Amino acid sequence: MCELSHMARPGSTLVVRVTPKAARNSLQVEDGLIRIHVTAAPERGKANAAVQKQLAKALGVAKSRLVLVRGETTRTKLFRID
């Protein structure tokens, strides 16, 4: 997994591109864009929860500090670190 602790500044925002129902969980950074693949299906918030968990682990912060600002039902999401 990619280490993103250098991005974990309170108040900063992160744009994330999500691929649900992937073969395996993964996280990459390409040209400043964070790409996350999760095995969870995009139903009832399961994929969003998996993305939040994976992103929090890569950033080295608690899941509760990540707030989904925009993109609850889309593949491009905006998270804020509180």
Image (cartoon, rainbow, N blue to C red):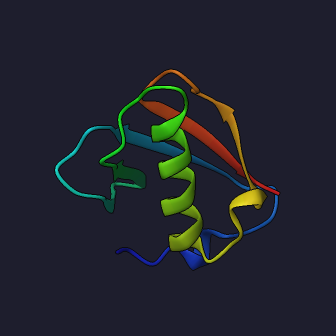
Q: Is residue 60 above or below residue 27?
A: below
Q: Is residue 45 left or right of residue 31?
A: right
Q: Is residue 10 left or right of residue 61?
A: right
Residue 63 in percent (x, y) is at 68, 61
Residue 59 in percent (x, y) is at 58, 71
- Among all residues in the image, which is located at the extreme left? 23
Residue 33 in percent (x, y) is at 41, 50
Residue at 52% x, 21% y is 73
Residue 72, quarter of picture: top right
Q: Is residue 37 above or below residue 25?
A: above
Residue 65 in percent (x, y) is at 77, 60
Q: Residue 42 or 3: which is nearer the viewer?
A: 42
Residue 24, quarter of picture: bottom left
Residue at 41% x, 29% y is 42
Report the label total: 0
Residue 5, quarter of picture: bottom right
On the rendered image, what quadrant is the C terminus found in?
bottom right
Q: Residue 37 or 6: which is nearer the viewer?
A: 37
Residue at 35% x, 50% y is 35
Residue at 45% x, 26% y is 43
On the rendered image, what quadrant is the N terminus found in?
bottom left
Q: Is residue 27 above or below residue 60?
A: above
Q: Residue 53 or 68: which is nearer the viewer?
A: 53
Q: Residue 21 or 69: which is nearer the viewer?
A: 21
